[in-house]
Image (cartoon, rainbow, N blue to C red):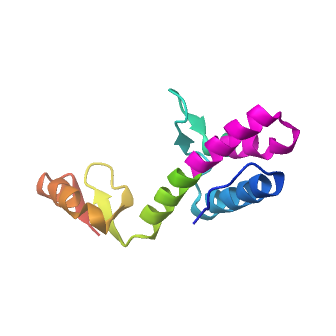
Amino acid sequence: MLNTISCNVSEALAFADAADAMVQKYGWQDMNVYPYSFPIKVTKVISDIRDFPVCTKGSQEYLVSLANGLAKVLNSWEEYELQEKIELQDTSTGTVFKLSKSDEDFIQELVDRGLVIRV
């Protein structure tokens, strides 16, 4: 679980390290976040936060806001990752994948429509 940060260099760099470790742990390198109206790779946001020490005070305040928003996203993603999963197989392609057990109603709808089978 990532904590929010305030406007100091050591917290920003520690946050970037912790966020990067979380991304590596769960394989989220290609995931996007949307701090604007367009997607940005989560790794790019973390890289931007690492620039904190060389930024102006105003830019540092912006990066704190960005980091705190990213903390909410990554914590939410981790919460989903830690949920119990159900393994399914796509009936048309044979691809096996997992969905959270909390998505049981959605999973049952897919099974009822013949789109997936439980593995």
Q: Is residue 117 shown above or below 56?
A: below
For the residue pair 40 and 119, the one nearer the viewer reads as: 40
Q: Residue 32 at what x, y percent from top left?
A: 55, 41
Which of the 4 image quadrants contains residue 51?
A: top right
Which residue is painted at 52% across and 53% down in the image? Answer: 72
Left or right relative to 111: residue 18: right
Quarter of the image for residue 54 reads top right
- Which residue is located at x 30 percent, y 68 percent? 101
Question: Image quadrant of residue 111?
Answer: bottom left
Residue 13: x and y in percent read: 79, 54
Looking at the image, residue 4 sits to the left or right of residue 89; the answer is right
Looking at the image, which is closer to me, 6 or 33? 6
Instruction: Give me the residue at 69% from left, 61% from top.
Output: 18
- Residue 105 covered by magenta stretch: no
Q: Main secondary structure of the magenta part?
A: helix
Q: Report the magenta residues as a range.
A: 45-70
**Does the magenta-highlighted stretch encompass residue 52?**
yes
Residue at the image point whose x is 57% and y is 66% from the top = 1
Instruction: Point out the residue furthest to the left here.
Output: 112
Which corner quadrant holds the C terminus?
bottom left
- Between residues 10 and 29, which one lies in front from this camera angle? 10
The vertical placement of 84 against 6, above or below, is below
